[in-house]
Amino acid sequence: MGISERKEREKEQRKNDIINAAEKVFFKKGLNNSTMDEVATEAELSKGTLYLYFKSKEEIHFEIKVRALNILKTMFQKSISEKKNGFENCMEIGKAYVDFVNKHRNYYKAIIHFESVDCAVCEFRDKCEKFFKEDNPLNSFVQTINQGIADGTIRSDIPANVLAQTLWAQTNGVLQFISTKQIILEFAGVEAEDIINSQFKIIGKGLKED
């Protein structure tokens, strides 16, 4: 390994160390209540060194979001089986998303937080656009919907990319409601699992070709 390659590897390792430290701080205190000073302390770096790698805590948070989406993408891809039709694989992707939310709640919150930002004025708009065109977890979902359209198990009157975004929005709405309105569910005598199962039934009927 040459000197330049070693330096680049060391730089990437330092960036990962900073992101790891930031996760501990952000996940404990929340992004808005955290500071770059706290991240520097957790990473055992000077604040000046920290700013050599990241301009702001928002930039670090963007990298955490990318981590989260890469984990989600891997879970989506693992849920897909060549032995199942498009409809069945779409339902498996939905289950994988619920599994992701349950197992990686802080990463899920990072995704939701960043999606609440106005992309039109987001300082990472170019990075977001590049990531979502190349590495977006929903790309796997769109491909699976197209599989279902081709094999006749999923309705063909809605474009796959539109259907994927619609289901993403609907499912996120349900999951956010469950995570923030637990007391309301308790008052209503409804279990979170029942709402999720109901959502899957509704999605299942909506996906199928008439």
Image (cartoon, grey):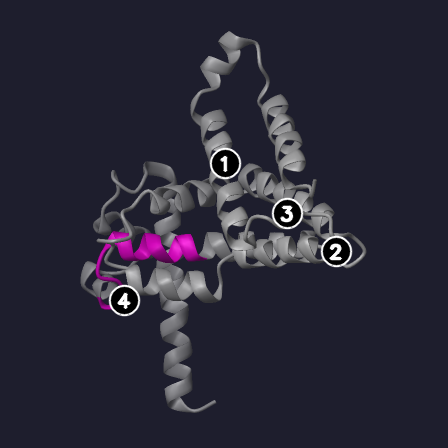
Residue at the left extreme? 48
The three-letter code of the residue at mark 2 reads Asp
Residue that numbered label 4 is attached to: 53
The mark lying in front, picked from 1 and 3, is: 1
User: CA gap, disc 2 to disc 3?
Assistant: 17 Å
Secondary structure of residue under mark 3: helix
Q: Is residue 174 left or right of residue 93?
A: left
In the image, residue 64 sits, relative to residue 203, either above or below, namely below
Q: Residues within 10 Å of mark 1 (few under 14, many from 20)?
A: few
User: CA gap, disc 1 to disc 3?
Assistant: 14 Å
Task: Give the x, y percent position of residue 2.
Answer: 43, 91
The mark lying in front, picked from 2 and 3, is: 2
Q: Quick one: quadrant of the C terminus?
A: top right
Residue that numbered label 1 is attached to: 170
Image: magenta residue range: 52-66
Asked if the residue under mark 4 is in contact with the one under mark 1, i.e. CB atoms within 8 Å, the reply is no
Q: Residues within 10 Å of mark 4 (few under 14, many from 20)?
A: some
The three-letter code of the residue at mark 3 reads Ile
Q: Is residue 63 magenta?
A: yes
Task: Give the x, y percent position of residue 6.
Answer: 41, 83
The three-letter code of the residue at mark 1 reads Gln
Among the two numbered marks 3 and 4 on one chain, the one whose residue lies closer to the N terminus: 4
Q: Is residue 131 magenta?
A: no
The residue lying at 45 percent from left, 31 percent from top is: 176
User: CA gap, disc 2 to disc 1?
Assistant: 25 Å
